[in-house]
Amino acid sequence: MSLWLPSSACGVHCLPAAGSVPRVSPGVALLRTAAVLGLLLLAAAALGVLPLMSQRRRASATRAFARSVLWALGVRHAAAGRLPRRGALVVANHVSWLDILVVLAHAPARLLAKHEVRRWPVIGSLAACGGTVFIDRTRPRTLPRTVADVAAALRAGGVVAVFPEGTTWCGRSSGRFRPAMFQAAIDAGAPIVPVTLRFLSEGTPTTVAAYLGEDTLLASFRRVVTARGLAVTLSAHPALHPAARASRRSLARAAASAVQPAPSYVAMYRVVDTMRHDPRVPPRTAAVVPAQAAR
């Protein structure tokens, strides 16, 4: 595998053994699936209207859609820390297709996505309407143009979210951050906000939502829709501000250090159960406290 097409050491061997994850009843899983399909049909019907909306209204609609899908899936989610509202590059670890929904549920972000997503039914059109910047990883010569597009979005006051690992990892292991998109933040003079995504199953770290290696999207969806007590925490770390002579590689290393702390991080903290079940509830931040203090 070339440096341009990153690979992950994680695969289906990282997924939990069958029967080891709490599951909902088949009836609940069926209702969740029907709710997700209904939301996708509603989104497809709205495709003709979205381009006519202002950027602010499209951002609000995107956030509502992301929260609604997470609610339909039975996935609780919460955010801690300060997320940017304009002019920043958000960089996060990459575990699952759920990562995108969680980021969009809490930040008014445009995404960087592989160009294949543009051809996906409904999802591709929604991504394009949401201002997604597409990257063609099969054509390295297009990378400078993509970096320039991201920099332009940042200069215009947009928030752009990227997953610099370039592929998914299970969450227990992680990959290095590719430095290319950090150049966009340097060129635009924009802050970089590192974000850590953690997946929990009834309060315990889990890989059930991971989408890895030879795994299929259908199999991953089935694990998510049948999981009981699945939750995601999004932790925003202090922003990095590129210096005049900042190196994109040093920024990538600093961001990775913030996003991918030592394994003891999970054992040191617990999430107070203030996660939202209903996407109509106004946004609020989940409390994240040291485990000893919470006892």
Image (cartoon, rainbow, N blue to C red):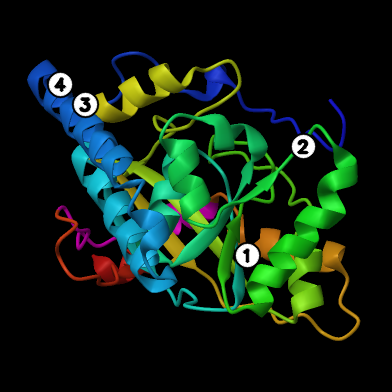
Q: Nearer the viewer, mark 1 or mark 3?
A: 3
272 magenta-colored: yes
Q: Which residue does the numbered mark 4 point to in the structure image?
A: 30
Q: Secondary structure at mark 4?
A: helix
CA distance for labels 3 and 2: 32 Å
CA distance for labels 4 and 3: 5 Å
Q: Position of residue 48 (x, y in %)?
A: 35, 48
Determine which of the numbered discs, if any, sits on residue 258 in the image: 1
Determine which of the numbered discs, if any, sits on residue 127 in the image: none
Q: Which residue does the numbered mark 3 point to in the structure image?
A: 33
Q: Amino acid at mark 4?
A: Leu
Q: Residue at x 44, y 67 (%)?
A: 108
Q: Secondary structure at mark 1?
A: helix
Nearest to N terminus: mark 3 or mark 2: 3
- Tell whether label 3 touches label 4 (CB within 8 Å): yes
Nearest to N terminus: mark 1 or mark 3: 3
Residue 274 in the image: above or below residue 34? below
CA distance for labels 1 and 2: 26 Å
